C-alpha cells in the first residue's frame, strides 16, 4: 500500500472536484509512491500533531485544514509544510470537499442533532455542474420539536464541550435546524431563506450574530474547529474500510486553539 492509495480512497470519500475554486485540497505534501502503513487524522497540521505523527511512525497525515492555502513564495523553518516534508510525512487536506460530500463534516454534525429530511443549506456557484441534489454547503432539516436548551445539551455532549455560545432564548421551540461546520457567517441568509429556527456553526462575527438575532434566527457556536473535529472518527472508520490493513488514528494532540477558562 502507498500514499497514492490514500489519495484514491480520500477522493472517493470526499471528491476533490466538489471543492470550490478558492480552496486548496488534495495531497499538498508528499509522494504518492511512498509506502503507507499508518495514517494520523487531525483538523490542523500543527507542530504538536507533526511531532505526534513522527514519533508514532505515521507516514501520512490527513489534516482537514489545508497546510498550504494561499500562493506561497517561500518555505521556511516555521512552515508546517516544510516541517512535514523534512519528516518525510505526506499531508492530505480535504477541507471543503469533506464538508460538501455525503457523510462528511456537515452530515456528521447533522447526525448528532438528529436532523431528518436534510438537504443542502446552499448549493453554491461552484457546484452548479454537479447533478446530485444532495450536494452543497451545510445541511438543513427537521428535528422533533424541543426547546433550544435540549438542542444545546445534545450538541455539548456530542462535541464534548463544557460551554458553547448561544444567541436566542433557551426556551424557544426548535423544529428546523441548519448546520454549517466552521465559519457560518456567509450562510446566514441561506439559513433564513430555509426557514430554519436555529443555525449551529463553529463561529460567527459579532454583527453577523446580531443580523441573525434581528431576523429571528437562533444561533449556537461551538468554536470553529470543535464543530469540525467530530467528523474525524467517522472518517477514520471509512478509511479503514476502504484500505484493509491500514492503521488509522485520530490525533491526541489536535485541539482547538482556544481554551475555556
Image: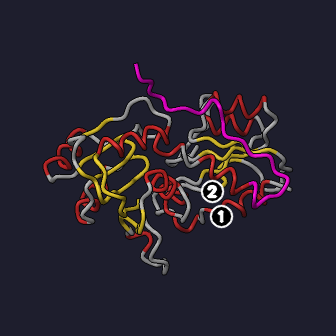
Whether residue 184 is situated above or below residue 117 in the rendered picture:
above
The dot on residue 11 is: 1
Q: Magenta region: which residues?
A: 240-261
| Viewer-nearest residue: 57 or 140 | 140
Single out the residue that lies furthest toward the left: 214
Single out the residue that lies furthest toward the top: 261
In what quadrant of the picture does the C terminus appear?
top left
Question: Quarter-wise, where is residue 15 in the image?
Answer: bottom right
The dot on residue 21 is: none
Residue name at image x 76 percent, y 32 percent: 54
In the image: residue 255, left or right of residue 85: left
In the image: residue 83, left or right of residue 130: right
Q: Position of residue 123 (x, y in %)?
A: 39, 69
User: Which residue is label 2 attached to?
Assistant: 26
Tell me if label 1 and label 2 are in contact, CB under 8 Å: yes
Residue name at image x 34 percent, y 57 percent: 178
**1 or 2: mark nearer the eye:** 1
- Determine the secondary structure under disc 2: strand
Residue name at image x 83 percent, y 55 percent: 2
In what quadrant of the picture does the N terminus appear?
bottom right
Q: How is the image coloured?
A: secondary structure
1 or 2: tag closer to the N-terminus: 1
Q: Position of residue 231 (x, y in %)?
A: 56, 49
Magenta highlight: main SS:
loop
Amino acid at each position: 500500500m502507498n500514499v497514492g492509495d490514500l489519495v484514491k480512497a480520500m477522493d472517493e470519500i470526499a471528491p476533490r472536484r466538489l471543492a470550490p475554486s478558492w480552496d486548496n485540497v488534495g495531497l499538498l505534501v508528499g509522494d504518492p509512491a511512498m509506502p503507507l502503513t499508518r495514517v494520523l487524522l487531525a483538523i490542523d497540521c500543527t507542530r504538536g500533531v507533526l511531532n505526534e505523527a513522527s514519533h508514532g511512525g505515521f507516514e501520512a497525515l490527513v489534516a482537514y485544514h489545508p497546510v498550504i492555502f494561499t500562493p506561497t513564495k517561500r518555505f521556511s523553518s516555521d512552515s508546517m509544510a516544510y516541517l512535514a516534508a523534512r519528516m518525510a510525512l505526506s499531508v492530505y487536506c480535504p477541507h471543503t470537499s469533506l464538508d460538501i460530500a455525503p457523510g462528511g463534516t456537515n452530515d456528521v454534525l447533522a447526525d448528532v442533532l438528529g436532523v431528518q429530511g436534510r438537504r443542502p443549506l446552499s448549493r453554491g456557484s461552484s457546484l452548479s455542474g454537479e447533478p446530485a441534489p444532495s450536494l452543497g454547503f451545510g445541511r438543513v432539516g427537521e428535528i422533533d420539536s424541543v426547546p433550544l436548551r435540549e438542542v444545546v445539551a445534545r450538541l455539548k455532549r456530542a462535541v464534548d464541550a463544557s460551554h458553547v455560545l448561544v444567541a436566542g432564548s433557551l426556551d424557544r421551540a426548535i423544529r428546523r435546524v441548519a448546520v454549517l461546520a466552521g465559519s457560518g457567517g456567509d450562510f446566514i441568509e441561506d439559513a433564513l431563506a430555509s426557514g430554519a429556527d436555529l443555525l449551529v456553526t463553529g463561529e460567527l462575527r459579532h454583527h453577523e450574530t446580531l443580523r441573525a438575532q434581528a431576523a429571528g434566527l437562533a444561533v449556537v457556536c461551538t468554536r470553529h474547529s470543535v464543530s469540525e473535529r467530530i467528523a474525524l472518527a467517522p472518517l477514520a472508520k471509512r478509511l479503514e474500510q476502504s484500505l484493509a490493513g491500514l492503521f488509522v488514528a485520530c490525533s491526541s494532540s489536535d485541539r482547538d486553539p482556544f481554551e475555556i477558562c
